Image (cartoon, grey):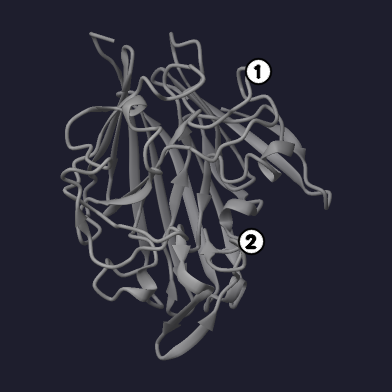
Amino acid sequence: MTATDFGTLPDGRPVRRVTLSAHGLTASVITWGASLQDLRLDGIAQPLVLGFPELAPYLAEGRYFGAIVGRCANRIAGGRAVLDGKALTLDRNEGGRTTLHGGSDGTGQRNWIIADQGPDFVALSDRLPDGHMGFPGALLVRVTYHLLPGPALRIAILASATEDTFCNFAQHSYFNLDGRPTVADHRLTVPADTYLPVDDDLIPLGSPAPVQGTHLDFRQPARLGDRLQGPLIDHNLCLGTRRTMAPRRAATLRARSLQMTIDSTEPGLQVYAGALLRPGAPGLSGQVYGPHAGIALESQLWPDAPHHPDYPSAVLGMGQVYRQTTTLGFARVRGG
């Protein structure tokens, strides 16, 4: 485990990077957004996530790359919600219409602190004050990145609040397992029978709909290149109706001879195929990232849950503990 300076924010605060190596994996995490900045597997030349060698892009076109986003990941329609009979006005940071990833100062856009570290793990924490971005209750959140045999990277998130609040975190890495300009040759499997149809603002319209016959049917391995030029892929796939104690299979992503599995406690997986990524600063291997350069597979609760009482609840009660565990497992496979 090594810790180094990664850059300086405009207000003068330093951003730190911690690099862990164990079990054939090397992960680098920066304090800005508690972001997974780099991830490597021994014997594989290219990084497995999109990221940048410098801080500046994370404040611009690389916003949310690898970050822990919250306190309420994904979108809340109209930037308004009701909790315990009280109307909340939230920060509308997406086109002045919706609240995205907890608002403009959500955890993915904040400088966390390193709370603990060891040879194969690092824990970071952040504290959001009462009323932050319009959400009630001071909220303390802690994420631990832990390298495990397999090899695997386990991401565990804990949070608690001083009042009832909304709480829904997601790890927002973009994955590319073969180093090519796009993920077209990747094959994705997600064991979800239903998804959430959305409006033009990507807000769910209501009840889940069957994936059967849609471009979002990934129940069998599907080559992404066959779907990237069709309708936008930026939807919640419904894995269940509640969070589970033990992680379950959420997705399998395969490219050439490398496979990644995602196991998570969360009932939803937001699949975003990166259609709106635009070239900017050079990435980890010196290339710029264009459309579909990576795919985000975000384990979380269903989006806009505050407006849908039939969705898995995003309410975190005072005195309760929010717990999420998501594990990324890697293996070489035959057949390419």
Q: Position of residue 93 (x, y in %)?
A: 61, 63
Relative vertical location of residue 264 with respect to residue 138 in this rendering, above or below: above
Q: Which mark is residue 286?
A: 1
Where does the image place residue 23, in percent across and percent down from the top left? 38, 20
Q: Considering only vertical position in the picture, is 48 above or below 174?
A: above
How many badges with numbers are in the image?
2
Distance from label 2 to label 1 (Cα)? 29 Å
Which comes sooner in the sequence, label 2 or label 1? 2
Residue 49 to residue 296: above or below: above
Give left or right: position of 137 versus 305: right
The image quarter containing residue 134 is bottom right
Q: Position of residue 223 (x, y in %)?
A: 29, 25
Which residue: 63% across, 61% down? 104
Query: Which residue sits at x=31%, y=57%?
Result: 197
Residues 289 and 49: in front is: 289
Residue 200 sits in quarter: bottom left
From the viewer's perspective, is 91 left or right of 77?
Answer: right
Residue 129, above or below 118:
below
The residue tagged with tag 1: helix, strand or loop? loop
Taking the image as shown, residue 306 lies to the left or right of residue 250, namely: right
Callout 1 crowding tier (Cα within 10 Å): few <14, some 14–19, many ≥20 = few
Residue on which disc 2 sits: 104
Regarding residue 316, the answer to whether it shows in the image is no
Residue 60 in picture, x, y percent from top left: 70, 43
Local SS, label 2: loop
Q: Residue furthest bottom?
A: 85
